[in-house]
């Protein structure tokens, strides 16, 4: 299985996890000119932009560590594009990370 397929499977798992938390998934793999967002969901009134990271090998470090400042900037730009495209201006927003490791899934709310 290549990394694209593996990423797709982890994003499906993340979408199930998000739904189990009571969120409504709005979009998967949203692409904008300046970046990409793995999942976009609604948690009540809040729009949640979620980065999914898989780290099945222990030597790679945590998934949250892989979300660099540059990656965060690209996610924020893509989030701005999504909000403008959908004409959402009043909703609170947050950025979460779901990381998958050998130990399981970890949901990090308000990660950045």
Image (cartoon, grey):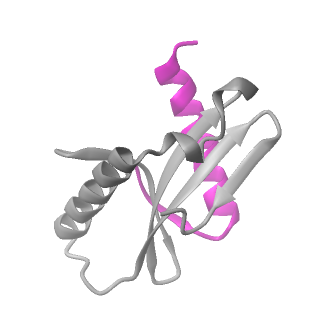
- Looking at the image, residue 1 lies above or below residue 17: above
Dominant SS type (magenta): helix
Give the answer, above or below, for where 32 lies relative to 42: above
Residue 66 spot, x, y in % from top left: 52, 39
* Residue beneath the point at 33% across and 46% down: 70
- Residue extending farthest to the right is 103
Q: Residue at 68% x, 67% y: name it.
A: 21
Residue 92, position in %: x, y? 40, 82
Residue at horizontal 25 percent and vertical 69 percent from the top: 83
User: Could you say which is closer to the camera, residue 51 or residue 86?
Assistant: 51
Q: Up-down: is 56 above or below 46?
A: above
| Side of 32 relative to 22 (left or right) | left
Residue at the far top in the pictured view: 1
* x then y, percent, for residue 81: 20, 60
Q: Give left or right: position of 93 versus 103.
A: left
Specify whether residue 82 is in view.
yes
Q: Position of residue 78 (x, y in %)?
A: 26, 54
Which residue range is magenta in the image?
1-29
Q: Which residue is the extreme one toward the bottom?
A: 90
Side of 109 where 21 appears, left or right: right
* Residue 31 visible to the viewer: no
Verify whether residue 106 appears in magenta: no
28 drawn magenta: yes
Which image quarter: residue 79?
Answer: bottom left
């Amino acid at each position: 299985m290549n990394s694209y397929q593996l990423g797709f499977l982890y994003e499906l798992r993340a979408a199930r996890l998000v739904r189990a938390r009571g969120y409504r998934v709005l979009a998967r793999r949203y692409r904008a000119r300046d970046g990409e967002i793995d999942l976009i969901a609604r948690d009540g009134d809040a729009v949640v932009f979620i980065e999914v990271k898989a780290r099945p090998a222990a030597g790679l470090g945590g998934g949250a560590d892989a979300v660099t400042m540059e990656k965060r900037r690209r996610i924020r730009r893509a989030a701005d594009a999504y909000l403008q495209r959908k004409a959402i201006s009043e909703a609170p927003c947050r950025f979460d990370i779901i990381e998958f490791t050998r130990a399981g899934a970890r949901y990090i709310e308000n990660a950045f």
